[in-house]
Image: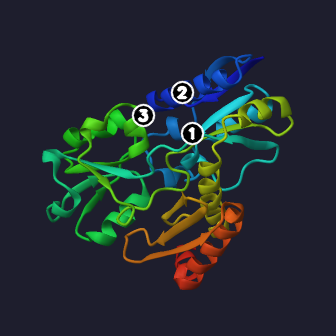
Amino acid sequence: MNIKIGTRGSKLALVQTNSAVAALQKAAPEIEAEICVIRTSGDIMQDVSLTQIGGQGVFVKEIEEALLAGRIDLAIHSMKDVPGETPEGLVFAAILPREDVRDVLVTRGRIKFEYLPKGAKIGTGSQRRGAQLKSFMPDLEIVPLRGNIDTRLKKIETENLTGVVLAAAGVKRLGYGEVVTQFLPTEIMLPAVGQGALGLQVRKSDAELAGLCARLNHAVTEAEVTAERAYLRALGGGCRLPIAAYGLMEGKRLTLEGLLAAPNGGEVLRDKVWGEPGEAEAMGRKLAEMILEKGGRRLLELMG
């Protein structure tokens, strides 16, 4: 079976795609794969913030359009880039085993988070990271940052930053572990929805390819990500506020922790629910309702 696989063209995206393709060909040797690099609006518009471009979906929209149009047969996404709602006609056939969900701090002089000086300049393009950092250290200066991991690391010097915050998964997949100053615990930095997980997306009508991809599905990661994405959807997929969620399977119990914050970190709403993996969707909805009741509705109304 010859298939075309769509992906973004960054070094990290290609490393992730090649890894997924190798696993797919091991599970289904009949697959011959051609990798097709697709530039997304998030890749093209590097000089404006993600919220200005449109926030969620800027790294997947063009790839999903190519999949729906039949120009590719399979899309490989970082699940943290995928909006809460999937376009009609597309489905995730597999969620692969998750990498480290945490964020990492990389600083000059290897200064840990708790020892950052007053007014330290920390680079990140993520509202979620900025809000959580400011909630612990209101005097930090958050410097908007875009670009791939290499670009952001270079900007520590070129932009005279104290440091940057990056996803541990990307740092590890690129073999950059030695640059890490500190893995930030989830108590300080709750991850993005789907962080560290890769998804294989196909057309719903392509049952044969969906069946082959399903051989790679990791049930534990699927349950965790399903709960997180249900939480995102229930808050409103296009929400402009910082959102974070972390599903964790321990034995047969699924824990889901969620966060909604004011962009400046002045207010952070956080709560947790427990259940079984089969209840993942319902858990996400329940947690969102709890957060909304705690003050989330008011925060959303303030953002208009």
The answer to which quarter of the image holds residue 236 is bottom right
Query: Badge 2: few (under 14), some or many (20 or more) residues near its Cα, within 10 Å?
Result: few
| Residue 206 in sight in this render | no
The first of marks 1 and 2 along the sequence is: 2
Residue that label 3 marks:
173
Which of these two is toward me, 185 or 300?
Answer: 185
Give the vertical position of 27 relative to 177 (above or below).
Answer: above
3 or 1: mark nearer the eye: 3
Farthest-out residue, front: 251
Residue at coordinates 74% horizontally, 33% vertically from top-left? Answer: 67
The answer to which quarter of the image holds residue 59 is top right
Residue that label 1 marks:
41
Residue that label 2 marks:
19
x and y, in percent, of residue 110 in the image: 16, 47
Amino acid carrying label 1: it is Ser
1 or 2: mark nearer the eye: 2
The Cα–Cα distance between marks 3 and 1, rounded to whole angstroms, is: 24 Å
Q: Do the residues labelled 2 and 3 touch (CB within 8 Å)?
A: yes
x and y, in percent, of residue 20 in the image: 58, 29
Which of these two is toward me, 88 or 226?
Answer: 226
Residue at coordinates 63% horizontally, 43% vertically from top-left? Answer: 218
Residue at coordinates 42% horizontally, 68% vertically from top-left? Answer: 263
Q: Is residue 147 left or right of residue 66?
A: left
Query: Badge 3: few (under 14), some or many (20 or more) residues near its Cα, within 10 Å?
Result: some
Amino acid carrying label 2: it is Ser
| Residue 103 in sight in this render | yes
Give the vertical position of 192 relative to 31 (above or below).
Answer: below
Residue at coordinates 42% horizontally, 39% vertically from top-left? Answer: 170
Q: In this view, does 196 lie to the left or right of 198?
A: left
The Cα–Cα distance between marks 1 and 2, rounded to whole angstroms, is: 24 Å
